[in-house]
Image (cartoon, rainbow, N blue to C red):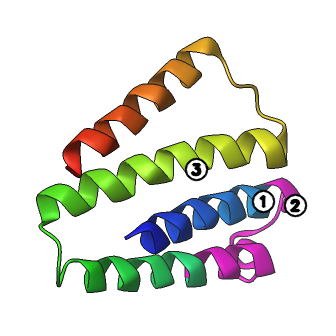
Amino acid sequence: MAGSACCNSAGSILLKQSRLVAVNSSFLETLLSPWFLSALVIYSTGLLLFAKALDRLPVSTAVPFSTGFGFILTTILSHYLFGERLTVNQLTAVSLIFCGVIVITR
């Protein structure tokens, strides 16, 4: 399950990178960008891992865990990789999401 969340987070980071390097690019150039194609592959891998996790986990646990963990990871990675600011509100929200993930998986 964590693998799926990591793939979704990595896919989002790669998608953001594809937009940073593709200033004023055409639709076709965007589709053929290595960053964009990598994001598609990683997102697809995450989807397959999530589907496999659903073989053993209830959807009511899997979705909140995957989504919450993905939010947390994406927030942290975007701060370190893109220099995005972390506000007090974001840190509070990430903390609440983390607590929610812990509660829902127990």
Q: Earlier in the sequence, mark 2 or mark 3?
A: 2
Q: Is residue 24 above or below residue 100?
A: below
Front disc: 1 or 2: 1
Q: Secondary structure at mark 3?
A: helix
Count residues near mark 1 (Cα–Cα under 10 Å), then give few for <14, some for 14-19, many for 20+. some
| Residue 97, picture quadrant | top left
Task: Name the foreground residue: 39 vs 45.
Answer: 45
Which residue carries the number 2 mark? 21
Residue in the picture at 79% in, 81% down: 34
Q: Report x, y in % for residue 37.
A: 67, 82
- Does the segment drawn in magenta span residue 59? no
Instruction: State yes or no: residue 25 in magenta.
Output: yes
Q: Is residue 33 visible?
A: no
Assess disc 3: are there few (<14), some (14-19) or many (≥20) residues with their C-alpha within 10 Å of its C-alpha. some
Q: Which mark is residue 73?
A: 3
In terms of secondary structure, where does tag 2 sit?
helix
Q: Quadrant of residue 90?
A: top right
User: Which residue is located at x 37 percent, y 86 percent?
Assistant: 48
Q: Which residues are magenta?
A: 20-40
**How far across and down, in percent of the image, does residue 46 sit?**
45, 77
Which mark is nearer the camera, 2 or 3? 3
Q: CA distance from mark 1 to mark 3?
A: 16 Å
Query: Element at badge 1?
Result: helix
Which residue is farthest top?
88
Residue 56: mark in rendering: none
What residue sits right under mark 1 in the picture?
Answer: 17
In the image, 96 versus 46, the foreground residue is: 96
**Image side of residue 24 versus residue 6, left or right:** right
- Mark before the other along the chain sequence, 1 or 3: 1
Circles 1 and 2: CB atoms closer than 8 Å: yes
